[in-house]
């Protein structure tokens, strides 16, 4: 609580735009959030009165559709929506002036605040459009040679898999994929699988921090320590972890990290971030051209041409919103919501949960299936008959419907999900 109070006091002295006293967050939400703190009970598991204030800050909480596919892309709170609208209206008056001469000056303060949230040096943060762009920059930028081996898994995100396969085709790399049967509640089992796969020519291990299909949290730090002991670098796909889990990027002990900010940080769609350990920036080639491609300046990865400065600047209000809640509190809430519905659902005959319910092995995402139904059938029925939006997953050895709540999700909506699963299961 003292950290959150400190946030509100300091926000007035942080400059202009999203990080000054006139930020939209301060105007729209600071008073409400401050009052909500009085409702917080450290001894309560749910704190529904507090979370109702957070829910009201999202228009998505009032939708006629129950949105439970936040693992794909998350709705933004009102403050981020209004910030984006404000910047778009300004840019529309004269893009070449307002974007390049006004908004572009906001990138460095934004970089500083993203770095603070990530717990790293601002000179290690590049701002781009999504995790695919961030990780493709790293994957195609690594100076690997013919015969060098990369270890990933078949459960990694498809765009990353295809990027490594493309490098394999183009440069003669060796791309090896492990396969896991999730859920796994044993870190050492996972680490050992990677360690056993290592060969003398292994140069890179690619790890997905949270497996997007079923929400398994991978033991990234343990994998990194094992890899580094063998002289291997680690690339981490943090698309589903940043803005959700309470961690700092350097604490993972990885070498490279990419994420989308439009997932659990609730920033505008089309915003992302890349982190490269400072002493490794120089050796990574930028994905798009730069006048100094071998520079040690992280900004060489931001020569994207004309892009939406408006989206970029609205990220600042998403950071304010995140800090107003607190990362630890947010992680605990979203895990509580996942566990709330999944514990009830797994008691229904014919229903299977494909994700661990322990907080060290999962957080927001859980997979669910009903015996005798294909994932796409269950997904379609939830939407058609109950207005519950999820996503059917058929990927390698994973076949389920992915359900992902967010901080704006109401328990009553999850009760409707459980009720729907029970009715569908009986008919199935």
Image (tube, rainbow, N blue to C red):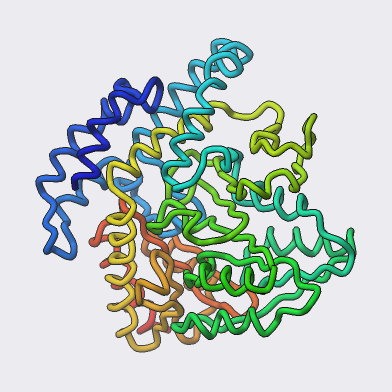
Q: Is residue 145 left or right of residue 90?
A: right
- Identify the residue at image location x=68%, y=45%: 281
- Identify the residue at image location x=54%, y=20%: 105
Which corner quadrant holds the C terminus? Answer: bottom left
393 in relation to 71, above or below: below
Q: Position of residue 426 (x, y in %)?
A: 35, 84
The extreme bottom residue here reads 349
Q: Position of residue 201 (x, y in %)?
A: 80, 73
Q: Position of residue 354 (x, y in %)?
A: 46, 79
Total numbered badges shown on the rendered structure: 0
Q: Position of residue 174 (x, y in %)?
A: 82, 71
- Identify the residue at image location x=58%, y=43%: 124
Between residue 366 and residue 7, name the one nearer to us.
Answer: 7
12 in relation to 55, above or below: above
Q: Is residue 52 left or right of residue 275?
A: left
Q: Is residue 133 left or right of residue 344?
A: right
Between residue 171 and residue 390, name the one nearer to us.
Answer: 171
In the figure, residue 415 lies in which quadrant? bottom left
Between residue 375 and residue 161, name the one nearer to us.
Answer: 161
- Identify the residue at image location x=28%, y=66%: 336
In the figure, residue 7 lies in which quadrant? top left
414 in relation to 73, above or below: below
């Amino acid at each position: 609580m003292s950290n959150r109070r400190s946030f509100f006091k300091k926000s007035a002295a942080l400059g202009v735009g999203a990080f000054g006293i006139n930020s939209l967050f301060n105007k729209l939400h600071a008073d409400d959030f401050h009052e909500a703190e009085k409702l917080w009970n450290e001894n309560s598991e749910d704190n529904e009165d507090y979370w109702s204030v957070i829910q009201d800050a999202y228009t998505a909480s009032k939708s006629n559709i129950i949105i439970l596919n936040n693992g794909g892309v998350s709705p933004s709170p009102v403050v981020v929506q209004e910030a984006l609208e404000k910047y778009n209206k300004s840019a529309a008056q004269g893009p070449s002036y307002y974007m390049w001469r006004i908004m572009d000056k906001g990138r460095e303060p934004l970089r500083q605040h993203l770095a603070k949230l990530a717990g790293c040096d601002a000179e290690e943060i590049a701002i781009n459009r999504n995790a695919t762009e961030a990780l493709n920059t790293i994957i195609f930028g690594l100076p690997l040679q013919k015969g060098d081996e990369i270890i990933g898994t078949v459960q990694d995100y498809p765009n990353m898999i295809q990027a490594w396969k493309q490098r394999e085709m183009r440069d003669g790399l060796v791309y090896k994929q492990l396969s896991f049967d999730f859920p796994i509640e044993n870190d050492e089992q996972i680490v050992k699988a990677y360690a056993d796969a290592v060969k003398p020519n292994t140069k890179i291990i690619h790890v997905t921090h949270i497996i997007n299909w079923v929400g398994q949290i991978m033991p990234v730090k343990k994998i990194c320590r094992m890899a580094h002991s063998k002289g291997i670098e680690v690339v981490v796909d943090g698309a589903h972890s940043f803005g959700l889990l309470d961690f700092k990027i350097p604490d993972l002990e990885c070498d490279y990290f990419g994420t989308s900010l439009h997932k659990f940080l609730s920033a505008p769609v089309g915003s992302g971030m890349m982190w490269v350990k400072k002493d490794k920036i120089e050796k990574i080639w930028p994905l798009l051209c730069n006048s100094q491609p071998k520079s040690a300046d992280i900004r060489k990865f931001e020569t994207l041409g004309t892009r939406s400065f408006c989206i970029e600047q609205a990220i600042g209000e998403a950071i304010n919103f995140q800090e107003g809640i607190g990362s630890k509190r947010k992680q605990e809430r979203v895990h509580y919501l996942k566990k709330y519905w999944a514990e009830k659902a797994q008691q229904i005959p014919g229903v299977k949960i494909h994700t661990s319910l322990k907080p060290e092995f999962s957080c927001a995402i859980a997979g669910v299936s009903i015996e005798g139904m294909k994932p796409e059938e269950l997904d379609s029925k939830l939407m058609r008959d109950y207005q519950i939006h999820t996503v059917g997953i058929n990927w390698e050895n994973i076949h389920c419907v992915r359900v992902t709540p967010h901080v704006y999700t109401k328990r009553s909506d999850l009760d409707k999900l459980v009720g729907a699963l029970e009715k569908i299961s009986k008919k199935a």
